[in-house]
Amino acid sequence: MKIEVLTLFPEIIDGFFHDSIMAKSVEKGLISYETVQIRDFTHDRHKTCDDAPYGGGAGMVLKPEPLGEALESIGAKDKRVVFPSPSGKRLTQAYAEELSKEDGLVFICGRYEGIDQRIIDLYVDDEICIGDYVISSGEVASLVVIDAVYRLVEGVISSESLEEESFSNGLLEYPQYTRPSTYCGISVPDILLSGHHARIEKWRMKERVNKTQENRPDLIKELVDQSKEGDKILDLLHLENNPKG
């Protein structure tokens, strides 16, 4: 997958691609990337990229001309273009999985009050919201989407690791423990030391359901309503709430 990022601050993006799993993915050729400095496509001596919004209001808006030229320079109309924005569709694991199937993605990093709507109308395929809050950096928002997507590209992370993560099968991940077996007076659950894999898997499933019920009951409701696993989840919750029943 090739990832191209249009930004006013390429140094924020570059660092992400040079560390950890992403760096290894780039080294293996699974991921490639390019940052495009939006200011390189301005034509005034001040390299102006923003202006006041029509109709008044606080803040500044990224101008369409430099953004449009930057997008044209990489042939963006023939690629899938993503613009992270509080006004977009919510990012989900399923959405990330869909994007991970693309050969390439283009990201536009907004700033200030956002970007001119005409750029969205002409170029953007996916306007994505990373959560119900507002941040000032389109670079940070783009990196959230990139991180959610690239790790799902085949070969980046083992399929076994992905299968048991939060949101796989609609549930949150079970608690994890490592050595030592006792820390600050708290011991690892005996079941994890038993070596009985079937019982461990059952315990983990129960913990996933319980954690999801506690932290994200909306996910439980969605699973019960739509999933074939709904009855099994209801049974686990019933047993947990009525251990003697």
Image (cartoon, rainbow, N blue to C red):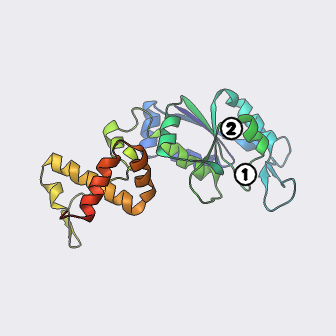
- What type is the residue that disc 2 sits on? Val
Percent position of residue 6, x then y: 67, 41
Foreground residue among 198 and 219: 219
Tell me the SS state at disc 2: loop
The quadrant of the image that shows the C terminus is: bottom left
**Residue 114 has which mark?**
1
Residue at the image position 87 percent from the left and 53 percent from the top: 54
Q: Label 2 neighbourhood size at 10 Å, few (<14), some (14-19), many (20+)? A: many
Foreground residue among 185 and 69: 185
Which image quarter: residue 181?
Answer: bottom left
- What type is the residue that disc 1 sits on? Gly
Percent position of residue 17, x then y: 51, 43
Residue at the image position 87 percent from the left and 56 percent from the top: 55
In this rendering, position of residue 131 left or right of residue 38: left
Q: Is residue 234 above or below residue 119?
A: below
Tell me the SS state at disc 1: loop
In this rendering, position of residue 194 left or right of residue 17: left
- Residue indicated by mark 2: 124
Percent position of residue 90, x then y: 57, 49
State if disc 2 and disc 1 touch (CB < 8 Å): no
Percent position of residue 107, x then y: 63, 40
Residue at the image position 72 percent from the left and 30 percent from the top: 73
Residue at the image position 34 percent from the left and 52 percent from the top: 173
Q: CA distance from mark 1 to mark 2?
A: 13 Å
**Which is nearer the N-term, disc 1 or disc 2?**
1
How many dots with numbers?
A: 2
Q: Label 1 neighbourhood size at 10 Å, few (<14), some (14-19), many (20+)? A: many
Q: Is residue 212 above or below residue 198?
A: below
